[in-house]
Amino acid sequence: MYSYLTKYIPSWKIDKRDTLYGCKQFDQRIVNLTHPLTENEKNVIEYIHQHQSEINGLTISELAKKIHYSSSFISKLVKKIGYTDFAELRYDLKSSIEEKADSPQYRVINQQKIDISKTNSMLIQTSFDSINHLLKNSTAIYVYGTGHSQANYMRELSRNLMLLVNVPVIFLSGRSEFESVQPVIKSTDCIWIASISGESRNVIEGTKLLCLNQVPIISMTPFSDNTLASLATYNLFYYSTPIPNPIRNRDVVSYLSLGYCIDYVIREYIDFLQKLK
């Protein structure tokens, strides 16, 4: 299973608000695809993703005429994604749009519940088998958070891993430590990296070096199109909706969903170890 949307559609420039408030069911079906998409299929899916409200009012023939693909081609693609027919896809989009319009999801407290629920749904559909085996077989585990808040949560990850593995767990407390260990991390080790944007220049440069050295990388980022996730060996996504700041022109960012993601990782690994007994 691919866990990253842009492995299918690299050209997508995903607006974070679209991924958080758009049709979660449609996006998740794309994430869960096990068969590769052709360029023509990617073009149609990209159009649907960017014009969800418009698709809601079109028949399959009207859509085919509008985007210059045949109705049979769209019908086959819809079934490939996992829908019974075009009508089910349209209903899915319509339901998501109505849910967004009718629910109080933009209220600060309720948005917290939505973010956690979406994060949980994403994690439930993620296979942890490879990640668990990586933790068990690594000769050393490095843990790094790109900012102060992310670092605090990643410190919790390293603290719990120290209790569960029999190899060194090295928490990297800042950029200088992250840069200093890059030449010495081995392909038999692994590194966990958390980033709110996945686009920090020093993180991307360091990640590319680690990739050259064939170091397994587990990224933890919000569900969005970002470079770190595209480079990492495994991706874990969480939802974090910016909270409008009523007194300053700068949104408040909550990392609670990252904390939930970390807790989920630890519980998954404990369950994995219990099954080995």
Image (cartoon, rainbow, N blue to C red):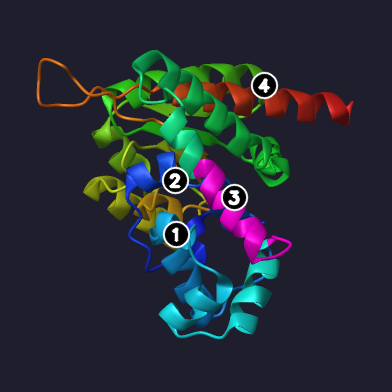
Q: Amino acid at mark 1?
A: His
Please give the residue where the numbered disc 3 appears in the rendered image.
92
Q: Secondary structure at mark 3?
A: helix
Please give the residue where the numbered disc 1 appears in the rendered image.
49
Which of marks 4 and 1 precedes in the sequence? 1
Distance of label 3 from label 4 (alpha carbons): 42 Å
Say whether residue 245 is magenta.
no
Among the 4 quarters of the image, the one containing residue 262: top right
Among the 4 quarters of the image, the one containing residue 29: bottom right
**Closer to viewer: mark 1 or mark 4:** 1
Instruction: Return the x and y of residue 104 as percentages of the image width and height.
Output: 42, 22
Which label was assigned to residue 164? Answer: 4
Q: Quadrant of the N terminus?
A: bottom right
Please give the residue where the numbered disc 2 appears in the rendered image.
22
Distance of label 1 from label 4 (alpha carbons): 42 Å
> Relative to the observer, which residue lies in front, 55 or 253?
55
What are the residue bounds of the magenta stretch? 82-96
Q: Is residue 49 above or below residue 264?
A: below
Looking at the image, residue 185 sits to the left or right of residue 86; the answer is left
Distance of label 2 from label 1 (alpha carbons): 8 Å
Which of marks 1 and 3 precedes in the sequence? 1
